[in-house]
Image: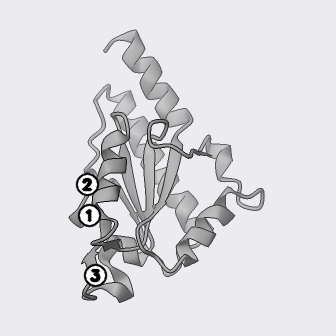
Amino acid sequence: MSVIRKVVNWARVKSPWVLHFNTGACNACDIEIIAALTPCYDLERFGVVLKATPRHADILLCSGPVTKQVESRLKMIYEQMLEPKFVVAVGTCACSGGVFKGCYNVKAGIDKVLPVAAYIPGCPVSPKALIDGLAKLLNSLEENKKREEVPCPLKKI
C-alpha cells in the first residue's frame, strides 16, 4: 500500500466530512441530525464535519424515503462525491420507506437507489443512535485500514 493511500485512509477515518440530504422525510430525523452536531452531543469530537457540497463529502447522510421526484437528484449527488464514498440511511423511512412505504410517489428506502454502508433505524432517530452508527462505520473503516484493504461500501453494520 502506497504512502499516499495510507494518508488518505487515515484522513478519511479521522475526519469524515458529511453531507446531509433529505429525500422526502417529515423533518424529524433532520432535526435530530442537527441536534447531534450541537455541543450537547458533539458529533464533531469524532472529527465529523457537516459540508455543503458533495465534492467535499465522504459520507452521505440520507433521511426519508426516496420519492420519485428526488431520485434522479439523489443519484446525481452521489455521483458527484469522490471515491471512496459511503451512504448512511438515517431513520426508519430511509431504511425501509417507513410509514410512507407503498405511497404512490415513494420508491422505498435509500438502498433501492444507492448502496448503503450503514443503517440507523428509529422514528425519529436519536442523536445517540446516530453517533453510535457513525462510530461503528468509522470503526469498520479503521479495521479495513489496519488490514490494508480498500473498504467495501456495501458492508452492513
Please give the residue where the numbered disc 3 appears in the rendered image.
Answer: 105
> Where does the image place residue 38, in percent across and percent down from the top left?
73, 58
- View extreme (front): residue: 69
The structure residue drawn at horizontal position 37% and vertical position 49%, both measured from the top left corner, is: 77
Label 3 is placed on what type of residue?
A: Asn
**Quarter of the picture holding the N terminus:** top left
> Where does the image place residue 99, in percent across and percent down from the top left?
37, 88
Question: Disc 3 to disc 2, how far (Cα)?
Answer: 21 Å
The structure residue drawn at horizontal position 34% and vertical position 11%, both measured from the top left corner, is: 2
The reply to whether discs 3 and 1 touch (Cβ–Cβ < 8 Å) is no
Please give the residue where the numbered disc 1 appears in the rendered image.
Answer: 111
The reply to whether discs 3 and 2 touch (Cβ–Cβ < 8 Å) is no
| Total residue callouts | 3
Please give the residue where the numbered disc 2 appears in the rendered image.
Answer: 115
**Quarter of the picture holding the C terminus:** bottom left
Q: Nearer the viewer, residue 131 or 112?
A: 112
